[in-house]
Amino acid sequence: MLQALINGLIAGCGYGLVAVGFALVYAVFRILHVANGGIYATAAYVVCWLTVDRGFGAPAAISAGILVGGTLGWLVETRIYRPLRHSNSSSLVLLIASLGVLIVVQNLLSLVFGDGTRTLRPGVVQSAIVIGSLHITLLQVAIVVVSTLLYVVTSTILFLTRIGCLVRAVADDHYLATVVGVPTDRVLLLVMVGASALASGAAILVAYDTDLTPMMGFEAVFIGITATVVGGMGSFPGAWLGGLLIGLARNLGGWWLPARWQDAVVFAVLVVFLLLRPQGFFGKPLKKAHL
Amino acid sequence: MEYLLHILVLGAVYTVLTVSLDLLAGRTGLLSIAQAAFYGIGAYTSALLVTQVEAPFLVGLLAGVAVAVLISFIVSLPSLRLHDDYFVIATFGFQMILFSIFNNWIGLTRGPMGIPGIPQPVILRWRVDTHLEFLVLAIVLACFAYLVVWRITSSPFGRALHAIREDEVFAKALGKNTLRFKVTVFAVSAALAAMAGSLYAHYITYIDPTSFTVMESILVISMVIIGGAGSLWGPLVGAVLLVTLPEALRFVGLPSAVAANLRQIIYGSLLVIMMMFRPRGLVGKYGFSK
């Protein structure tokens, strides 16, 4: 039981980071950026390819993965989202285009790397810290530390710096921000690249903990969306907590139910929240008049 | 020849699906990702009844439709209180839960092993067992779906749906009970999708959960969008195009694994390209842009 709790929290740290990237884009762009799942999976595969197939060291590979993820985010924003935004397309149009990107990227990955599962872990047995009956691997400790650190750094930038202030201004109202002289397109580009880098970081952490499949991007999208809804659409700490909650739900759900129902548990959480509290823990109540 | 007929039957099955989704997405502006789930409900209900209690084809088909309509209320009553992105997310959640049930409730659906040996349909005395006869049946059902949608959209009910798509608050201000309209149209759409599912199950004679994944929903969405949402011929064009186009890849002689990925890549790129340059689809009028 305690072990499931700990595992849930650790998995939740990874999911939380996925969700934070997702929530960041939703808060600023007001679109469901599902293409982020493609960026996420690509970063993990780049790291896997460089370390396992090419024999590069982990630090170089991880930087390359984040770089590739950021570049992809830059491409998606400048080539797809920006032109669509400028032609006043609705959020559904952007969502469909984003979905197209996810499908293309995911299939390119499985074309290049195969459909099979790949692993990043160096060996089968890992050194673990044993406290009583609890096993925590050093890798898992690293996941918790890195994920918390990235979350704290992102929040600091967002809430305490001038750039963060510009980002929040754009998130509040694109037009108003443009009118008072905020370079909206540049801020949006920055957010997109940042969110892509966050997603890449999360992907690499999760890839070290579990394994890689071309479908991992889709999983990240499920989890990102659910965590964002649970935490409150657009709420930053909410997304983080939402990720933790999903990690717990999956692992504790696995305690009572056979493991194959794990995903159903996540979606049951999603549906329950949508029905009973669509604004999540920290979101603003949905406006009735905006129906 | 048999092969050509097979492609045409699949084209007709997908036309029923695209017409059903177009009623929701194109005509009413509700983008649902749960269409494959209702397709699956139709297929499973029908297949189980026919194989387990040896019910006739039409009973299976009608039962599939009935179950889909019932479940559509469970999905739509709560989901339809939500809007835009939230509605999309809610239908996505239901799609994933229903797929999970198809895949994991082994006692009922046999899970990933699927249901084999679904008999070919017998309607009254007519035994449908050649590709040609199947094509006739499929075209009849596709025409029926078209008729339903045409009847709905050309009635006052259809004009209310149009109003909801363009401006829901305005429709409400005119005293329309928009929730009731949306729940009804969702049920009709689910019923048509279930009909397609039942037909598919009896045609392929074997079903397993992989035919009813979220990717299948996305494929149907792609068909509607590429063909043209909210138009008469859009769903037909989209379904036929996206069924035949990948078949052309077969003749290039690619290994099947590569071809499967390549097909998805084509769908994905088409989605992006259409959204960038022609959001209203090949023959459509309405482009999701308010």
Image (spheres, rainbow, N blue to C red):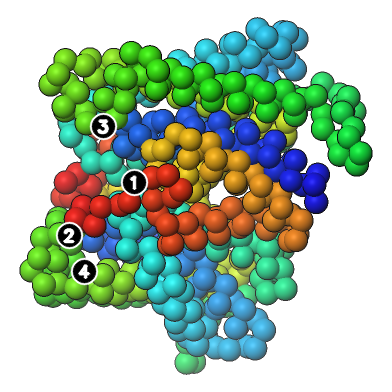
Instruction: Name the residue rendered at 43%, 62% in the picture.
Output: A275
Q: Which mark is residue B11?
A: none
- Whether callout 4 and callout 3 share a subunit is answered no
Crowding around mark 1 (Cα neighbors within 10 Å: few <14, some 14 to 19, many 20+) is few
Chain at tag 1: A
Towards the viewer: B222 or B15: B222
Q: CA distance from mark 4 to mark 3?
A: 30 Å
Sequence-first tag of 3 and 1 = 3
Q: CA distance from mark 4 to mark 2?
A: 7 Å
- Asked if the residue under mark 1 is in contact with the one under mark 3, i.e. CB atoms within 8 Å, the reply is no
Q: Quadrant of residue B19?
A: bottom left
Residue at label 1?
A284
Q: CA distance from mark 2 to mark 1?
A: 22 Å
Towards the viewer: B229 or A287: A287
As helix, strand or loop, the secondary structure at mark 1 comes to: loop
As helix, strand or loop, the secondary structure at mark 4 comes to: helix
Amino acid, disc 1: Lys
Amino acid, disc 4: Thr
Residue at label 2?
B168
